[in-house]
C-alpha cells in the first residue's frame, strides 16, 4: 500500500476545476467567506449562505465550505461537523456489474459470517 497522507483541500478539487464549476477559484472563495465572517459560522450556516447568495448549487456549496474550513483550520481532513472522523475507500475492479455485485456480497458474507444478499429490486442488502 502507498504511504501517503491526505492533507486536505489541496489534495482534492483544483483551483481550475473549482473555477470552471463555480466561477471562482479557492482564493476568491476564501476571500468572499472571510469578508462575510464565515470563520465563526457553523458548517450548515456557511453552506446555506453560499447556496443562497451564489448560483453554485448545494453540492458545490458543501464542497467550498469544507475546503474553506480545512484551509482556515476549522476542520481537519476526514473530520465531520460533530468533531468525529470518518474515512472511506474505493476500488475499481475490472468486472461487469453482476460479477462486481457478486464479489461484494461474497466479501460481506465472509466478513459477517452470514449470508448477504441483494433484496429484490436491488439497492438494499439483506443479511440472512
Image (cartoon, rainbow, N blue to C red):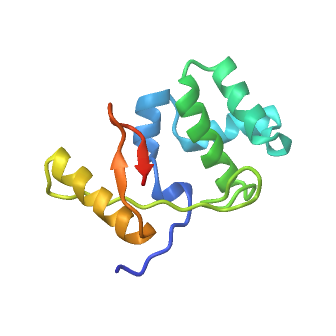
Mark yes or no: residue 30 visible.
Answer: yes
Name the residue: 20% across, 58% down. Answer: 93
Q: Is residue 51 left or right of residue 59?
A: right
Residue at the extreme right of the image, as rendered: 40
- State whether residue 21 is above or below residue 124: above
Quadrant position of residue 92: bottom left
Q: Is residue 12 left or right of residue 32?
A: left
Which of these two is toward me, 118 or 30?
118
Q: Quadrant of the C terminus?
A: bottom left
Residue at the extreme front of the image, as rendered: 128
- State whether residue 92 is above or below residue 45: below
Image coords of residue 109 (percent x, y) = 36, 64
Image coords of residue 95 (percent x, y) = 14, 54
Name the residue: 45% across, 67% down. Answer: 112
Q: How many marks?
A: 0
Q: Quadrant of the N terminus?
A: bottom left
Mark yes or no: residue 28 visible.
Answer: no
Q: Is residue 66 left or right of residue 104?
A: right
Image coords of residue 25 (percent x, y) = 51, 39
Which of these two is toward me, 125 or 47?
125
- State whether residue 46 is above or below residue 1: above
Which of these two is toward me, 29 or 77?
77
Name the residue: 66% across, 42% down. Answer: 30
Quadrant position of residue 8: bottom right
Image coords of residue 11 (percent x, y) = 47, 59
Amino acid at each position: 500500500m502507498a504511504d501517503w497522507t491526505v492533507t486536505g483541500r489541496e489534495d482534492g478539487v483544483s483551483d481550475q476545476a473549482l473555477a470552471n464549476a463555480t466561477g471562482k477559484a479557492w482564493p476568491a472563495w476564501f476571500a468572499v467567506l472571510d469578508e462575510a465572517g464565515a470563520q465563526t459560522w457553523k458548517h450548515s450556516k456557511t453552506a446555506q449562505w453560499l447556496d443562497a447568495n451564489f448560483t453554485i448549487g448545494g453540492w458545490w456549496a458543501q464542497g467550498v465550505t469544507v475546503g474553506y474550513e480545512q484551509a482556515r483550520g476549522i476542520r481537519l481532513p476526514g473530520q465531520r461537523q460533530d468533531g468525529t472522523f470518518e474515512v472511506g475507500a474505493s476500488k475499481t475492479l475490472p468486472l461487469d456489474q453482476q460479477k462486481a455485485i457478486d464479489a461484494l456480497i461474497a466479501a460481506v458474507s465472509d466478513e459477517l459470517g452470514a449470508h448477504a444478499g441483494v433484496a429484490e429490486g436491488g439497492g438494499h442488502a439483506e443479511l440472512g
